[in-house]
Amino acid sequence: MIQAVLFDLDGTLADTARDLGAALNRLLAEEGLPPQPYSAIRPIASHGARGLVSLGFGIDREHPRFEEYRLRFLDHYEHSFADETVLFDGINSMLDGIAAKG
């Protein structure tokens, strides 16, 4: 008997790529860098803060400012994580089905 169903909300139930991209682009603007287009952000969004910082700044985790950028990115995201986030299609009915099975 199944007693629990666990989900990773960010990127599994909810499409958060636009809010993640907006946080990255705000950070890039602070640094005087051009924004990344959504078409570049979308495939990297599932890699989280580390992937997006690497994308935006063209650096890896060994770069001396990487952790600073990552933390600043997370601060931006914390203040606007649900501005454009939506549930993926079919999620509500799936959750209703799970709830109906107890």
Image (cartoon, rainbow, N blue to C red):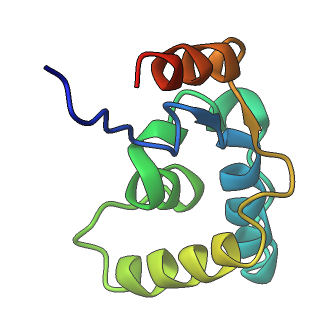
Q: What residue is at 85 percent from the left and 47 percent from the top?
A: 84
Height in image: 88 above or below 9? Answer: above
Quarter of the image with the C terminus is: top left
Height in image: 100 above or below 66? Answer: above
Question: In screen coordinates, is 10 left or right of 3?
Answer: right
Q: What residue is at 59 percent from the left and 56 percent from the top?
A: 56
Hey, which quadrant is residue 74 in on the image? bottom right
Q: What residue is at 71 percent from the left and 62 percent from the top?
A: 81
Work out which residue is located at the far right of the displayed protein and give it: 83
Question: Residue 20 at x, y = what percent?
Answer: 66, 53
Q: Nearer the viewer, residue 85 or 90?
A: 90
Question: In screen coordinates, is 4 left or right of 36?
Answer: left
Height in image: 96 above or below 33? Answer: above
Quarter of the image with the N terminus is: top left
Height in image: 76 above or below 20? Answer: below
Q: Nearer the viewer, residue 15 or 40?
A: 15
Question: Residue 76 at x, y = what percent?
Answer: 69, 77
